[in-house]
Image (cartoon, rainbow, N blue to C red):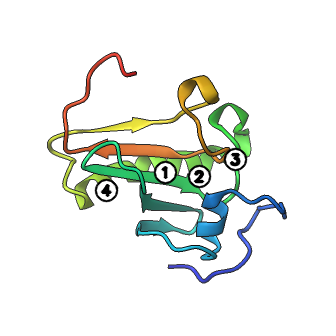
Amino acid sequence: MSTPGPVPGAKHNPAMTIFEKIARREIPADIVYEEEDFLVIRDINPQAPVHVLMFPKKVIPRVGEAEAADAGVLGRMLAASGAIARKLGVYESGYRLVINHGPDAGETVPHLHIHLLGKRSFAWPPG
């Protein structure tokens, strides 16, 4: 795991998101996976028996505001989802990835994050 400190590429913001504070190790979280530029933590309000949140250490407010320079970290997060699902025991049974954009979609933290949910059946369409 990386050491606490400023997150590369992050701009100082006095109103940091909870994910920024977790990335800086200012508040605790149950970290299940980490790479240089993103973290995966257990959700504190799980909506499934397995519910983790994947987020870049650099603040990207929401998926619709991602820029071309963010493609690398976003791609690595998606590519890591299989390994994370295996680690959490949901790869074989199946898992769902969810990204919310805006209040109508259920976004509650203005810091892009991907929900990885599993160990229960999900309906389609969602919501």
- Residue at 33% of width from left, 56% of height from top? 84
Left or right side of 118 for 97: right
Label 3 vs 4, first from the N-terminus: 3
Amino acid type at image mark 3: Ile
Residue 43, x across and y down, in percent: 42, 54
Q: Is residue 62 above or below residue 46?
A: above
Q: Which residue is mark 2?
A: 73
Q: CA distance from mark 2 to mark 1?
A: 6 Å
The reply to whether dot 2 and dot 4 touch (C-beta < 8 Å) is no
Of residues 115 and 29, the one drawn nearer to the viewer in this rendering: 29
Q: CA distance from mark 2 to mark 4?
A: 16 Å
Residue 6, x across and y down, in percent: 74, 74
Q: Which residue is mark 3?
A: 60
Q: Which residue is mark 4?
A: 83
Amino acid type at image mark 1: Met
Q: Which residue is mark 1?
A: 77
Amino acid type at image mark 4: Ala
Q: Nearer the viewer, mark 2 or mark 3?
A: 3
Q: Is residue 125 above or below residue 59?
A: above
